[in-house]
Image (cartoon, rainbow, N blue to C red):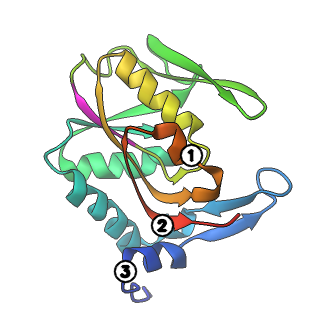
């Protein structure tokens, strides 16, 4: 039985998130979106909101591994445009282009297929949560270095206290639910 959707998209997101304490490490409260994904009507409302905002302004949707794939692919399908995955190094089978970036404790590399786009495409980068912004910033840089125009970054949730938006300055960033405290 489906329960009625709350009145606003923010209320909807709040009602469909689950906090998982001490994951993936002690002291971290993980914002789990799987209850949102399990509710088809709620998930559809979030994707429809993104689609309404971006319709006619982008040529491709780029999703960041892994939950960004879910939101991004659904959005691309709704808009009738292509989807490109950004993956951790070594996960794509074809020829890739990558970028390395610093994390709090070390570094990481993300990649896309070299033939994912030809250059000049207007792309939207999508993830489930904007946290520290490191991966989002790296994805934007990777795409722009390949000749794409990053139109914007979207995520349903933002952990404001991690200041990820600061790493995306000068870009159009949209998040729906802003979590202010850790």
Give, as a single range, the part of the protein colored magenta. Answer: 121-125
Residue matched to label 2: 177
Q: Earlier in the sequence, mark 3 or mark 2?
A: 3
Give the crowd class for mark 1: few <14, some 14-19, many >=20 residues within 10 Å.
many
Residue 123, magenta (yes or no):
yes
Quarter of the figure with residue 22:
bottom right
Tag 2, which secondary structure? strand
Q: Of residues 39 and 31, which is closer to you in this image?
A: 31
Of badges 1 and 2, nearer the viewer stands 1
In the picture, residue 175 is in which quadrant? bottom left
150 on left or right of 110: left
Q: Which residue is mark 1?
A: 164
Sequence-wise, which precedes: disc 1 or disc 3?
3
Q: Residue furthest left?
A: 56
Which is the main secondary structure of the residues drawn in magenta? strand
What label does residue 73 carry, if any? Answer: none
Residue 102 spot, x, y in % from top left? 67, 26
């Amino acid at each position: 039985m489906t329960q009625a959707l709350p009145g606003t998209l923010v209320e909807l997101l709040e009602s469909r998130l689950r906090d998982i304490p001490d994951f993936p490490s002690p002291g971290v409260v993980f914002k789990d979106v799987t209850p949102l994904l399990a509710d088809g009507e709620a998930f559809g409302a979030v994707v429809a909101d993104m689609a309404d905002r971006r319709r006619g302004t982008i040529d491709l949707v780029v999703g960041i591994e892994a939950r960004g794939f879910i939101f991004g692919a659904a959005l691309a399908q709704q808009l009738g445009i292509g989807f490109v995955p950004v993956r951790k190094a070594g996960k794509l089978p074809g020829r890739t282009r990558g970028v390395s970036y610093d994390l709090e404790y070390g570094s990481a590399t993300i990649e896309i297929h070299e033939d994912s786009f030809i250059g000049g495409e207007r792309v939207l980068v999508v993830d489930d949560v904007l946290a520290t912004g490191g991966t989002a910033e790296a994805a934007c840089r990777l795409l722009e270095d390949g000749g794409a125009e990053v139109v914007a970054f979207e995520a349903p949730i933002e952990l404001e206290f991690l200041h990820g938006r600061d790493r995306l300055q000068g870009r159009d960033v949209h998040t729906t639910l802003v979590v202010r405290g850790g």
